[in-house]
């Protein structure tokens, strides 16, 4: 009889946080990982390349838990606007994702949605709902600023592959009508849902597309209820449910 192996250890990969390479008041946020490690008695592994800490935010990636990671070129490869890691290119990022997160396969999308203060976080754009299925938001109005970049994301995903070489199932989520605060376009997106233990909570925007999005996600998450949470006020802070949460692995 084969003896059971050691129980997998949950540890913390400590990335640096710099407020999306945009705001100056990030120093206290950057100490959270150490505090969690002390409180939970978990090992912490600072992530660095060329002797410099690697900057990464949770909303900038999404994973399927099997070795595939989603991200955007706008968020991490742009060297001029909100540059997280100056001089760091695609291959270096992929090495970091592989060595620290176990993600050997990276699917790069292009641009995030208009109004996203983070400059391209993927959690407003495309998310895994299970290891082989992802949802990606799509804009029907061809005159909307989001139409072309979202269509490009859809087209990229048609040739994407998972870690085992299989094609993922790709399902479209609608976009709500544009939400504005003065002249600011707000990043309202149904992709910014949060998967909790007992439910999936989804931002809603008093929009006819709310019901469509909840219906699509309800069909995909059969093991827990899908619950809409009013997020019109929340998105005034340039993010919604996934942006203000952080999951902890079992």
Image (spheres, helix red, strand yellow):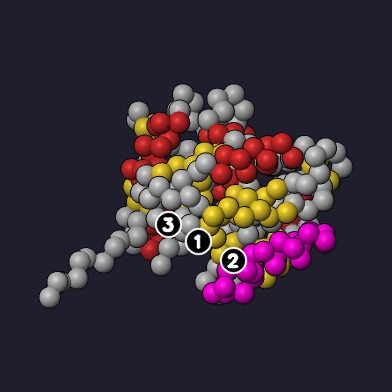
Q: Nearer the viewer, mark 1 or mark 3?
A: 1
Residue 235: image location, x then y, percent: 74, 52
Residue 129 locus on image (x, y percent): 54, 60
Q: Which residue is mark 2?
A: 220
Mark toward the start of the polypeptide (2 vs 1)? 1
Quarter of the view holding residue 220: bottom right
Rendered residue at 46%/58% (across/down) = 131
**Mark 3 or mark 1, which is nearer the start of the sequence?**
3
On screen, residue 212 above or below 79: below
Image marks 2 and 1: residues in contact by CB distance under 8 Å: yes
Residue 184 at x, y percent in the picture: 81, 40
Marks 1 & 3, CB-CB < 8 Å contact: no
What kind of element bears circle 3?
A: loop
- Magenta stretch bounds: 204-226
Q: Which residue: 68% across, 41% down?
A: 150
Residues marked 3 and 2 touching at CB (< 8 Å): no
Q: Which one is in front, 169 or 137?
A: 169
């Amino acid at each position: 009889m084969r003896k059971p192996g050691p129980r997998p250890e949950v540890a913390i990969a400590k990335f640096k946080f710099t407020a999306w390479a945009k705001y100056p008041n990030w120093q206290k946020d950057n100490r959270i990982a150490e505090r969690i490690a002390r409180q939970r008695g978990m090992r912490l592994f600072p992530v660095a390349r060329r002797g410099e800490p690697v900057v990464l935010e949770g909303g900038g990636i999404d994973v399927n838990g099997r070795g595939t990671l989603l991200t955007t070129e706008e968020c991490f490869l742009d060297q001029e606007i909100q540059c997280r890691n100056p001089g760091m290119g695609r291959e270096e990022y992929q090495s970091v994702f592989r060595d620290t997160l176990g993600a050997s396969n990276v699917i790069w999308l292009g641009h995030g949605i208009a109004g996203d203060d983070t400059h391209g976080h993927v959690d407003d754009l495309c998310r895994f709902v299970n290891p082989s299925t992802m949802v990606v938001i799509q804009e029907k109005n061809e005159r909307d600023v989001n139409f072309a970049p979202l269509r490009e994301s859809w087209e990229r995903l048609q040739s994407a592959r998972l870690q085992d070489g299989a094609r993922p199932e790709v399902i479209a989520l609608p976009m709500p009508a544009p939400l504005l605060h003065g002249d600011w376009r707000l990043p309202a997106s149904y992709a910014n849902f949060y998967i909790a233990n007992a439910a999936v909570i989804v931002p809603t925007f008093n929009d006819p597309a709310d019901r469509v999005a909840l219906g699509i996600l309800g069909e995909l998450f059969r093991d827990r209820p899908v619950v809409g949470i009013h997020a019109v006020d929340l998105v005034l802070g340039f993010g919604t449910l996934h942006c203000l949460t952080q999951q902890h692995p079992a």
